[in-house]
Image (tube, rainbow, N blue to C red):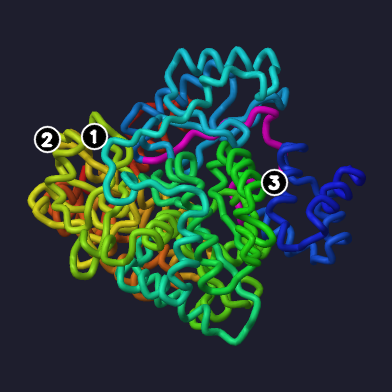
Amino acid sequence: MNDFIVQLLEANGYRKTRLLAILRAIQATYFHIPKEAITLLSRLLGLPVSHIISVVDFYSFFHSTPRGQYDILFSDSITDHMQDKQNLMNYFSHQCQVGIGQVRKDGRVSLDNTACTGMCDQGPAALINGYAVPRLDRPKIDLIAKLIEQELPLAEWPETIFQVDDLIWKTGLLLNSRLEPGESLLAADARGLNATLNEIDQSKLRGRGGAGFKTALKWRLCASEPEQERFVVCNADEGEPGTFKDRVLLNRYADWLIEGMTLASLLIKSQQGFLYLRGEYLHLFEPLQAKLAERRRNGLLGDNILGKGWSFDIEICLGAGSYICGEESALIESLEGRSGIARNRPPYPVTEGYLNKPTIVDNVETFIAAAHIAIQGGNWFAAQGTEQSSGTKILSISGDTPQPGIYEVPFGTPISAILEDCLAEDVLGVQVGGPSGTFISNREFHRRLAFEDLPSGGSFIIFNRQRDILEIVRNFTHFFADESCGFCTPCRVGTILLSEQIDKLYDGYGSVGDIVALQELGHLLKTNSHCGLGQTAANPMLNTLARYPAIYQSKIKFPHFGPGFNLDEALQAARKIAHRDDSEAHLSQSGD
C-alpha cells in the first residue's frame, strides 16, 4: 500500500486540493479507504487525520469499511420508483444473493441505494463501481449477475450495459446554432474584450443554475478585484433530482462549454479553470479529458492560445456523491479538498472564492450561452424570452411522458405548451425546478417558465393522476434528510423530523397535530437553515399541502395526538416467540 499511495501522491503533485481524486483512487483499488491509507495520507500530505476522516465520512461514495468487488447502487429518484425500481432491486438482491445495504460474505458484491443518478430519462438506473447503468430490467440484471459470478472485469462487460443516450426532442436558440472551435474567442478578440462583456450584459444573460444572478455583472465584479490570480469554475454537479441536461451538454457539446470557459478566462483575466464534474457522471470523465487534450493540441487551450499570447487551462475534478456540492461555495470547499459545507456569505466567491482568490462559478448552460453571445451579439439572445428572463431554457423532462429527454424552450413559455411538446396527458401536477423548486397543480398550467414566475435550474418532472402525492413528497423529503451536510442544527434535525412526520402520515398514523407540526417545521427550516438545502427542504410538503389539503386531511386518523406506529403490530414477533395470541397479549391504542 505504501508504494501505491506514494505513486498516487506523486501523480497528484502532493496537492492537498487533490484529496478527493486521491481518495477516489484508493476507494477504487481497495473497495474502501483503509485506516493505514488515512495514516499515510496524513503524514505525507501534512493533513490532520481528523480532516481526512471527516472528508471520507462526508461523501457518500467513500467508505471506511470494505464494499464489494462489484459495488451496485440503485438510483432512488422518484422517477426510478415510478419505473418499478424497488421490484427490480429486490430481484437483483435475489439473483446475486446479497441483501440491500449489505456486502455478500465472499466480498464479491454489495448492494445499496443512492440518490438520483441523473438518468431520469432512461431509468430505472444504477451505478456499478461508479459507472452508470441505465434502463435496468430483468434480462439486463440476469446478465449482470452472470458477469459478476464470472468475475469478469468491468472493462470486458458488453458496452450495451452502459449505453447512455442523448435524448434531445426539441432544440432552440442555442442548440440550433453552430460554433466552430475557437470561433467565439476570435469574435471576442475582433470586437474587443470589454465590448464583448458589454454584449453579454446587453443579452441580459442570467445564470442558468436557478438563482439567476446576472452573468456580466458577476464577471465584471470578479475582473475588478485587485487580486491578480483569478479562477473560472464550471459547476457541472447538477444533483437536483430530475435534472440531467448537463449530462447531455457535456457529452454532445463539450467544445462549446470549454469555449465558454475560455472566453470567460479572457474577460476576467484568469489562467486556470476547473470543471467540477458530478461523481455520478464518471462515464464522461475520460471523454472530457480527451476533449481537453484535443483543444490543447489545436492551440485552443494551454499556453499562447490561437497565437494571441493568452494562457488558460482546465482541470477536471470529480465529485464523490454529495448534492450540497452543487451550491457554489460548498463546491469550492470540495475543490479545495474539504467537506462540501456551504460558506457564510459575504464574502462572495467573486471576491474570495477558490483559495480565497476571486472566482466565478457558473454552470454548463451559462458558459455555452456566453460563447454563442460572443459570436451572435447580445440582441440576438435578448430577442427571445421575457423582460427579466432573456433567451431560452434547456429542460430535463422526465416522469409521466412518453418522450422524456431534453427540450429547449424560450423563457416565458406556458407550462401547458411544454406539456404538449412532450405529449404528456392526464397530468396531475408538475415539479418545476426539482424538489427545491415549486410543485404546481393542473390548475396552474397557464403559468410561465421564467424568473418572474417559475424559475428552474432545468428539472421538470411530470406526474399523472395515478400518482400518490404523499409518496412523491416522502421521496423528496427523505432525499433532503439524507443529503443534509449536518452543519447547522435546523437542517440537520429539521429534515429528519420532517421526514419522520411525513412517514407517519404516509403510513396512516397522522393526526391534526401532525399537520400543524409539519407547517411549523417547514417555517423553521426555511428561516433558520444555513444554506439553500435546508431553506428549500420543506418546499415539496408546503407546496402540496397548499394545493392538495384534502389529501393530507384524508391521511388523518387521529383527531389530536396519534402514535407514530402500531404498537400492537410491533409486538407480533414477540407473541409468536412466546406462543401467545390471547387477548391479554394484545394492546389497544387510541383510535382503534
Read off the residue under disc 3.
Answer: 24
Read off the residue under disc 2.
Answer: 426
Crowding around mark 1 (Cα neighbors within 10 Å: few <14, some 14 to 19, many 20+) is: many
Q: CA distance from mark 2 to mark 3?
A: 45 Å
* For residue 156, above or below residue 578: above
> In the structure shown, which secondary structural element does the residue marked by tag 1 occupy?
loop
Does residue 3 appear left or right of residue 238 in this picture? right
Residue drawn at point x = 30 percent, y = 68 percent: 203
Does residue 328 appear left or right of residue 377 in this picture? right
Does residue 292 appear left or right of residue 210 in this picture? right
Residue drawn at point x = 34 percent, y = 67 percent: 206
Task: Answer whether labels 1 and 2 touch (C-beta < 8 Å).
Answer: yes
Start and end of the magenta stretch? 58-77
Most foreground residue, 77 or 14: 14
Residue most extreme to the bottom? 226
Residue most extreme to the right? 3
Q: Position of residue 344 (x, y in %)?
A: 51, 78
* Of pointers 1 and 2, the one earlier in the residue sequence: 1
Read off the residue under disc 1.
Answer: 400
Q: Position of residue 112 (x, y in %)?
A: 54, 35
Residue drawn at point x = 59 percent, y = 38 percent: 287
